[in-house]
Amino acid sequence: MTLDQKRQKLITDYTAAVNKKVQNGKITQDKANELIKNYTDKVNKWDGTGFPPGMKGMFMGFKNFNEGDYKRFENALDKAVKDNKITESQKQDILNYLKGNKDKSGSNTSNTNTQSNL
């Protein structure tokens, strides 16, 4: 997938999610338009490295994964790669980030998958 295709996919998925909130009466159309515009601007500025806009903060709460949680999350990332929502490289960046957080929290990471054994 090219960077432009990734950007378009992110924008399309985000737009659909925001429009669903409008349909469910959770936000106004004006608010949706504002959110979509701001997100589109961020995505269009993204150079394709690191986390896509809006993704990095999603993983901040996962500092203390146990092995089962980590494996379930890794499986979800595998599905995202298969569905072309993220690249294998992005998946690995996420896993490395989580592994780094586990190391800092003192949890044992010896049983988790790393790039060298995937």
Image: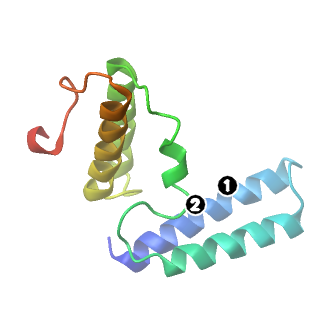
Q: Residues within 10 Å of mark 1 (few under 14, many from 20)?
A: some
Q: Report the front residue among 60 and 9.
A: 60
Q: Residue at x 88, y 69 (%)?
A: 30
Q: Is residue 61 visible?
A: yes
65, above or below 18, in the image: above
**Considering depth in this image, is 86 or 51 the residue closer to the camera?**
51
* Observer-nearest of 28 and 109: 109
Where 35 sits versus 82, above or below? Answer: below
Q: Which mark is residue 17?
A: 1
Image quarter of the C terminus: top left
Quadrant for residue 41, please give it. bottom right
Hey, what amino acid is under mark 1? Ala
Which residue matches tag 2? 13
Q: Answer yes or no: do the residues labelled 1 and 2 have beta carbons within 8 Å? A: yes
Image point 44% across, 32% down: which residue?
63
The image shows residue 71 at horizontal and vertical percentages of: 32, 27
Q: What secondary structure is marked by label 1?
A: helix
Which residue type does callout 2 highlight?
Asp
